[in-house]
Amino acid sequence: MSTSDMSTAYDDLLDRYRRVSNLRQASMFLNWDQQVTMPAGGAPGRAKQLSAISATSHELLVDDDVEAWLDELDGADLDDEQAASVREIRREYERNESVPDELVEQLTAVGSENQQIWQDAKAEDDFESFAPRLEKLRELSVERAGHIDPEKPAYEVLYEDGQPTLPIERMEDLFETLRAEIPPLVDEIRESGSDLATPFDGEYPEADQRALCEAALDFLGYDRDRGRLDSAPHPFMAGNQFDARVTTRYKPDDPMDALTATVHEFGHASYQLGLREDRYAEPMGQPRYSIHESQSRFWENHIGRTKPFWEAFLPTLEEHLDGHDDLTAQAAYEAANRIYPENLIRVEADELTYHMHIILRCEIDRAFVRGDIEAEDIPRIWNEKMDEYLGVVPDTDSEGCLQDIHWTSGFAGFQGYTLGSVVAAQLDAAVREDLDVDGLVREGEFEPIHEWMTEHVHRHGQRYETEELVEVATGEPLTAEYFVDYSREKFETLYGL
């Protein structure tokens, strides 16, 4: 192939991919609107809008022209970024080209419809009304997996939607390490008889909590020209390098919950806002989703739950929450890091037991997709696993198997949360080799930390696959050792073990 032919094929391929990406962006913001501002009655129309966009973007992605351009570029002399872009587009094409358009459209419509049904079921503690939707979603998801790769278990195919470059066996190795390390540490904390400060009691007006969360975003350096804060039933971030919006939720008796959720979603936004603007809608300007959770967990846990953060941020908290003029940084730090296995809610879980919440979801997820259990079995099995792993059983399904939004749209996605904590600890160790992180945080100087993350992670987009990106960023292969060491050192000190 001549250089000009190669260039034309590459430019045409990238132009098509940009169109697909922009349709996906539009879909994402319609989804944001559905969760944040859309009236409940808009759900039927929104389902049709989203399914039309997904069908159109699917048709554009699997068009014969895309196959022809990929064939032309096979073996072509491409630079590193071009080769990575073609690799990522080829992966998406190959995963989608055998899936019928009507199935794509149907899955999107079902997922959109499920959001309102789930929200109502959760509010009314009515799992029975949501169970048939789970069965339908499983049926369609397994069918799609069969189109993508009939030789693989459906669950593994679905797992690869979120983790296409990290083999499931590698993920399971990381999980085994955490299974071996976390429960004994939690047991030591339980048996120690020690407890940490609980300075927040009473009720806190939502307006005060919102003002606190807004102040935290400003404190951390959130770009208000490219973002906003709203509330949603389940906190999330939606966006790109030009518009990265965050949401949180407010509990009247726990301002720390909204604050940590806001810092968590800020971490997601910081990744999006750190992507290359000149590569918007291209693979080089899109995040590696297997890394996304590391950014939120880094900012939530390795910055927002540190004592230097509370030494710097405490005056802001006192300004927005009445009755805490005598609160110390140490007490706030302890409150942000209490281990409480009796907690029922994943997004409110402490830094250690959080992963037992993830593990039980992954186990139920896998058994359900395989057909080993039915939807009607999930509440019972959920409660049994909560008792086994955390020693607590929810009184309602709203506090149990209905608490997460994830099963409205798909399966096999929970692993990424634990992966995020593992990668965050490894990144934290690496950035502390280069920067005085505690000193910067204590002074409220976050820009050098943002710059380090942009340089080592964000600017690469999808140039590297997961494990390679971790090694490029930290200089070492992916390992759970940093998370284990960090957890032991932090909580042994806090609890005097």
Image: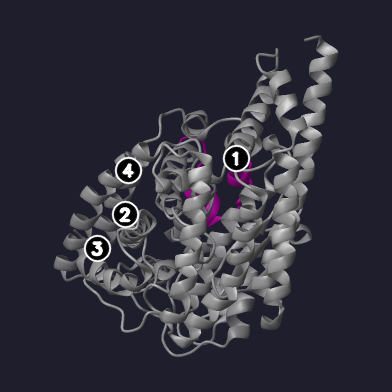
Question: Which one is in front in this view, the residue at disc 3 or the one at disc 1?
Answer: 1
Asked where in the image residue 239 lies, by quadrant, the reply is bottom right
Separation of disc 3 and disc 1 at Cα? 54 Å
List the residue tagged with mark 4. Answer: 172
- Which is more toward the observer, 411 or 142? 142
**Residue lying at the far top of the rendered structure:** 2
List the residue tagged with mark 3. Answer: 495
Separation of disc 1 and disc 4 at Cα? 28 Å
Q: Earlier in the sequence, mark 1 or mark 4?
A: 1
**The disc label shown at residue 98, or none:** 1
Q: What element carries label 1?
A: loop
Mark 3 and mark 1 in contact? Answer it, CB < 8 Å.
Answer: no
Circle 2: residue type: Lys
> Is 56 included in the stretch rendered in magenta?
no
Q: Which of marks 2 and 4 is nearer the N terminus?
A: 4
Position of residue 44 measured from the top left corner of the image (x, y, whole percent): 69, 75
- Which is more toward the observer, 181 or 30? 30
